[in-house]
Image (cartoon, helix red, strand yellow):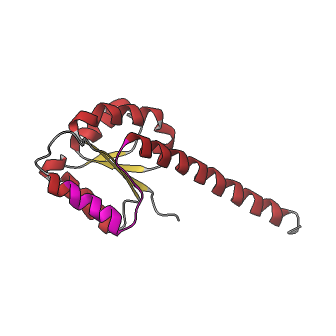
Amino acid sequence: MAAERCIALIAHDQKKADRAVFARLHRQTLSQYRIFATGTTGGRVLEACPELDVTRLKSGPLGGDQQIGALIATGEIEMLIFFIDPLTAMPHDVDVKALMRLATVYDIPMALNRATAERLADFSVRQEKAEAGFSGKANESNADGGQ
């Protein structure tokens, strides 16, 4: 049985509305993942798309960023989408940097803005279609005697 696919969604306060719009636009792709999100971000995503499988962790400044970092370190998170607000000072900036460092150390795809998140979502859809097409061709090939 294949392991459950998990991603992390985080957004700074000034980017939470953007995060909800992104979730609505990509609900089909996101529905194929178990989603871990920091507190308020998870709430906003669930309001926008109640059908998604979202596990809400603590708020980022209260340890949520560190909880997601631990999930990255244990291999449970395969992608991080984090809408950061580069124009607002963050009192927990050190936690944010540690989270980005873990995503880099464990070499998982990481989007820090909507443009990159859009590309990751599009790539994920294309990759799944390609894998499904490849599997289908392999099965067709085997069904006709491998010719």
The reply, left or right, for residue 102 in relation to residue 119 is: left
Which quarter of the figure has residue 6? bottom left
Indicate whether 141 appears above or below 50: below
Q: Residue furthest left?
A: 91
Q: Is residue 62 magenta?
A: no
Indicate whether 59 appears above or below 133: above
Residue drawn at the location 60% of the way across and 49% of the way down: 126
Indicate whether 87 appears above or below 136: above
| Region of the chain picked out in magenta, as a range | 96-113
Residue drawn at the location 51% of the way across and 39% of the way down: 28
**Front-lying residue, 109 or 49:** 109
The reply, left or right, for residue 118 in relation to residue 88 is: right
Residue drawn at the location 37% of the way across and 34% of the way down: 50
Quarter containing the C terminus: bottom right
Indicate whether 68 appears above or below 81: below
Q: Is residue 111 magenta?
A: yes
The reply, left or right, for residue 14 in relation to residue 54 is: left
Residue drawn at the location 43% of the way across and 41% of the way down: 115
* Viewer can see residue 31: no
Q: Where in the figure is residue 74, as x and y percent of width and height? A: 32, 68
Q: Where in the figure is residue 77, as x and y percent of width and height? A: 37, 59
Q: Count every numbered label the image shows and give the total.
A: 0
Which quarter of the figure has residue 102? bottom left
* Viewer can see residue 69: yes
